[in-house]
Amino acid sequence: MPGIAFGAGFLLIIGLWTPIAGTIVTLFEVWRIISQHGDLWTNVLLAGLGVSLALIGPGHWSLDARLFGWKRIDVSTEKH
């Protein structure tokens, strides 16, 4: 199991498959919270970071952005 967490962390560092890797990190940390391994608040913090990275997605300099294009959402303030 630590190998999976290491692999997901490595994918997050290089910015490849960011939503999938963030989800794996989140699931791993939730499992650690439930099974009472390690410090509770460290696991909560890492799970929160995994969720945020999975939802936000890759950054501009990530491999995901280079391979698949960087998606940008523009929010219009005009009322129709």
Image: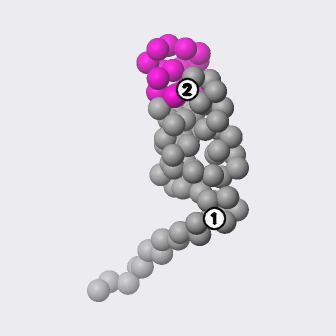
Tell me the crowding category of disc 1: few under 14, some 14 to 19, or many 20 or more residues within 10 angstroms, Cα based: few
Residue at x 62%, y 23% (from the top left corner) = 2
The count of marks equals 2
Percent of width and height locating residue 55: 47, 51
Q: Can you say whether 68 is above or below 7 in the image? A: below
Q: Quadrant of residue 67?
A: bottom right
In depth, the one of 80 and 29 nearer the eye is 29
Three-letter code, disc 2: Asn
Instruction: Identify the mark at residue 43; answer none if there is no mark.
Output: 2
Quarter holding the N terminus is top right
Instruction: Identify the mark at residue 6; answer none if there is no mark.
Output: none
Question: Residue 33 colored magenta?
Answer: yes
Quarter holding the C terminus is bottom left
Disc 1 designates what residue? 67
Kindly give the residue lying farthest to the top in the view shown. 36
Percent of width and height locating residue 49: 56, 41
- 1 or 2: mark nearer the eye: 1
Q: In which quarter of the image is residue 79?
A: bottom left
In this orientation, does residue 48 appear? no
Three-letter code, disc 1: Leu
Percent of width and height locating residue 48: 51, 38
- Magenta-tinted stretch: 28-43
User: Marks 1 and 2: CB-CB under 8 Å?
Assistant: no
Residue at x 43%, y 18% (from the top left corner) = 34
- The secondary structure that most of the magenta stretch takes on is helix
In depth, the one of 24 and 47 nearer the eye is 24
Instruction: Please give left or right for residue 17 compared with residue 74 in the image.
Output: right
In this orientation, does residue 13 appear? yes
Percent of width and height locating residue 72: 53, 71
